[in-house]
Image (cartoon, rainbow, N blue to C red):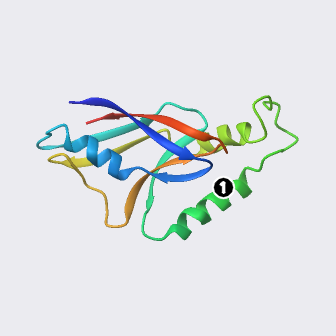
Amino acid sequence: MALGQLEIVVNGQGLHEFTEEVNHWLAGQNLFGSGLCTLFIQHTSASLLIQENADPSARVDLENWLNRLVPENDPLYTHTLEGPDDMPAHIKASLTACSLGIPMENGRLLLGTWQGIYLWEHRHHRGKRRVIIQA
């Protein structure tokens, strides 16, 4: 079993694919047999998901839908010190996933043809997010 960390650069709110970064890390581990690749994000305002990676309009539609479901500047929010996108980001992260488990065979992810691994950034900021990887 191997444990590592990936830093994913985000340029603001939206879905950021990092399938290749996971594949690159796995390739360096010399894994054999079947197993599970576990990914865990160490943040409370971003999430992880597996989603279509062929048509970018699917990602745009997901982002637009979630922004409509959880708007900024809702008068019910009391957690507002970190900006108008912070509380909505926490709600979005609670509705989505902080970890993923993906089956593997001989160090290769068993993703479907149009599936990619995404970090879903719910804040507007640019920067890096940490994802723990275990395989």
Q: Residues within 10 Å of mark 1 (few under 14, many from 20)?
A: some
User: What residue is shown with label 1?
Assistant: 66
Marker count (numbered): 1
Q: Is residue 134 toward the left or the right of residue 94 in the image?
A: left
* Residue 40 percent location from the top left of the image: 42, 35
Amino acid at pointer 1: Leu
Quadrant containing the C terminus is top left
126 displayed left or right of 36: right
Q: Residue at (55%, 62%) from the top-left corner? A: 59
In this picture, residue 105 sits left or right of residue 8: left
On the rendered image, what quadrant is the N terminus found in? top left
Could you tell me which residue is drawn at 50 percent across and 36 percent down? 129
Q: Quadrant of residue 43 in the image?
A: top right
- Which residue is depicted at the point 65% across and 41% down? 125
Residue 74 x/y as whole percent: 84, 44
Seen at 73% across and 57% down, the residue is 68
Residue 92: where, in percent of width, then height?
Answer: 64, 45
From the top left corner, tell me how far across and down residue 121 is, in percent: 58, 45
The image quadrant that residue 133 belongs to is top left
Q: Tell which residue pokes out farthest to the right in this image.
A: 75
| Element type where label 1 sits in the image | helix
